[in-house]
Each structure stands twice: as C-alpha cells, then as structure tokens.
Image (tube, helix red, strand yellow):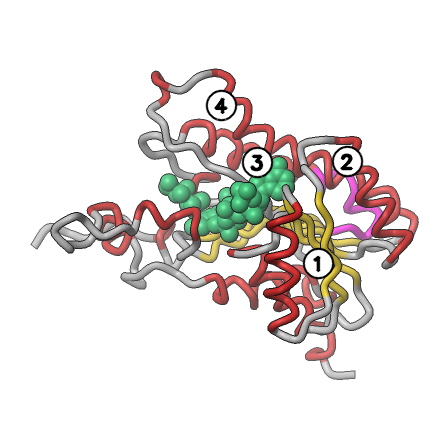
Amino acid sequence: MSFVNKFSLEGKIALVTGASYGIGFAIASAYAEAGATICFNDINQGLVNKGLAAYEEKGIKAHGYVCDVTDEEQVQALVAKIEAEVGVIDILVNNAGIIKRIPMIEMSAADFRKVVDVDLNAPFIVSKAVLPSMIKKGHGKIINICSMMSELGRETVSAYAAAKGGLKMLTRNICSEYGQYNIQCNGIGPGYIETPQTAPLRELQPDGSRHPFDQFICAKTPANRWLKTEELQGPAVFLASDASDAVNGHILYVDGGILAYIGKQPS
Ligand code: NAP
Ligand code: GCO
C-alpha cells in the first residue's frame, strides 16, 4: 500500500467547531474532499443555515448543529447526537473563536473572561466530550486552532494572546495525557489570514490608501502578503490523517514565515 493512502480521510467522521465560514469552513471542506463525513456547529441557526448552503454549493453533504461551545451541557448533547446520528467522532477541530481588540487597561474583566471562555475553556469542554469514545475506539485526532498570539504579543489582544497561549499548552497536555491511547492532539497556528475576523485590519482608509496594519503585517511576513484560508487545508488534512500518527503535541505554524523573521531591515 502506498504511503499516499495514509493521507486519505475515507470513512472518518470529523467535527469542526464554528465552521459556517472562514477557516473552519475551509478545513471542513478539505476533510470532505479527502473522504470524511463532516459535522459542524455554530452559535445560531442563521449561521448553521448559511454554512449548510455553502457546503451544499460545493457538493458536500454536511451535518450542521446549533451549539454554544462554551456550554458544557450543550456540548455533551451535541456529541451524543452526532454519535447517534452519524457515528463516533474520529477528528475534532477546535476552531470556534472570538477576539476583542481593546487596550488591556480599558478592558473589562467580563470581556477578558468571555474571550478566554470561547478560545480556551471551550476547546477543553469539547475535547473532554469526544475523548471517551476516542479512547474506547483506540484512535483519535484533536486539532486546536492556535494563533501567532500563541507565541507573540501585541497591543490590544491581551485576552486573545492569553487564551491562545493557553491553548498551545492544553494541546501539549492532551498529547501527554492521552497519547497512550493512540490519540494525537496537535495545533495549527495560522498567520494572518483573510477572513471576516481580520477584515477590520485590512479596511481601506478614507483616502483609499491601505490600512497601516495591513502594510505592517505584509512587512512582517516574508511571503509579503496575507494568507488565504485554503492554505490551511493541506496542513489540516495532514494532522487529521494517519500520515501524522507519530506527530503529537506539535504546533504547526502556517504563517508565511512570520515567526522565523526578524523583520525588514531599514533601507
Ligand atoms: P471567526 O470569526 O473567528 O469564526 C469562528 C466561528 O466560530 C464563527 O462562525 C463564530 O460565530 C463561531 N463562534 C464564536 N463563538 C462561538 C461559540 N461560543 N460557540 C460556537 N461557535 C462560536 O473566523 P476565523 O478567522 O475563520 O477564525 C477561526 C479560528 O481561527 C479562530 O479560533 C481564530 O481565533 C483562529 N485564527 C484566525 C486567524 C485569522 O487571521 N483569521 C489567524 C489565527 C487564528 P460568530 O460569527 O457569531 O462570531
Ligand atoms: C490581531 C489578529 C490576530 C489574528 C491571528 C494571528 O488582531 O492581531 O486578529 O490575532 O487573527 O490569530 O495568528
């Protein structure tokens, strides 16, 4: 059997959280193309409908559910429903996330907690819900969507950086605790990706010039551009497939080289 077959997701069931659009949608679409059955959730019915229509347009039959990933009861019910209607989840992608860009001394504790709740507590809650069946099955893949902010700080994103840094360590801990059951937990650290989440950082200025943050990010990226959601598909399929069974506790940064680069030298 060729090693290429190890990249196939044929027969696998994947749950991608918050996957109606953006990065989650691109990853789930790639999983479908690689042969997996796709389940996704989002926070309200409107988003789930939007997601279902978008998958259908690509010829993908996806199972969509409304579920708030910060609510443990809703998550337990979601996983039980998927197991009953579709089957045991082989691949979980903790993708749902939020960001609030507020200078730290102006940020309320409630806003800080909200970000940590969605970006860190929820991956704990969803992973906890899928792990027992993965342990029973003797195999499973958990992929946490981390960030540049798992490694770097910047103005206004204290809660997001704290949560995504924590998510990196949750990834390593799930690997440490459940690797013995043939479960691999890895992270993907996307660089700056063109999605609605980053749209405010790319908005044109009133005079038609580029947003200063847009120019800043391109200068910080050796690739000299924003990345596209599709560029996360190959790495996400790899980490979900048998081809990566010996890769565990790793964060794969897909960042166009940002973390390797000291920055442009002054001319
Ligand atoms: P996004 O706007 O962060 O999309 C995430 C999805 O999750 C949205 O549909 C969102 O719904 C949903 N969601 C939010 N809270 C939820 C909850 N409590 N329960 C269930 N679903 C919830 O878009 P994205 O840019 O594609 O980001 C996806 C992930 O990648 C996030 O974890 C983000 O932090 C991470 N990331 C993004 C970038 C980037 O450059 N875009 C880079 C690195 C990492 P709403 O639309 O209602 O918010
Ligand atoms: C920001 C951005 C980021 C990115 C991403 C980087 O305000 O700096 O929104 O944090 O979305 O997570 O990897």
| Residue to which mark 2 is pinned | 74
- Report the predominant secondary structure element of the magenta stretch: helix
The secondary structure type at the circle numbered 4 is helix
**Image spot of residue 265 (x, y percent):** 15, 52
Distance from disc 1 to disc 4, alpha carbons, whole Å, reads: 36 Å
| Residue to which mark 3 is pinned | 119
Q: Which residues are magenta?
A: 174-184
Give the mark nearest the N terminus, 4 or 2.
2
The secondary structure type at the circle numbered 3 is helix
Q: Given contact means CB atoms under 8 Å apart, are the residues at marks 3 and 1 in contact?
A: no
Distance from disc 3 to disc 1, alpha carbons, whole Å, reads: 26 Å
Figure quadrant of residue 236: bottom right
Q: Is residue 159 above or below residue 134?
A: above
For the residue carrying disc 2, how many other residues have a C-alpha within 10 Å: few (<14), some (14-19), or many (20+)?
some
Q: Given contact means CB atoms under 8 Å apart, are the residues at marks 3 and 2 in contact?
A: no
Distance from disc 3 to disc 2, alpha carbons, whole Å, reads: 17 Å
Which residue sits at x=69%, y=35%? 124
Residue 37 in magenta stretch = no
Give the mark nearest the N terminus, 3 or 2.
2
Q: Which mark is residue 62?
A: none
For the residue carrying disc 3, how many other residues have a C-alpha within 10 Å: few (<14), some (14-19), or many (20+)?
many
The secondary structure type at the circle numbered 2 is helix
Q: Which mark is residue 246?
A: 1
Three-letter code, disc 3: Asp
Which residue sits at x=49%, y=29%? 162
Three-letter code, disc 4: Phe
**Image spot of residue 217 (x, y percent):** 28, 51
| Residue to which mark 4 is pinned | 112
Give the mark nearest the N terminus, 1 or 4.
4
Q: Is mark 3 within 8 Å of ligand 1?
A: yes
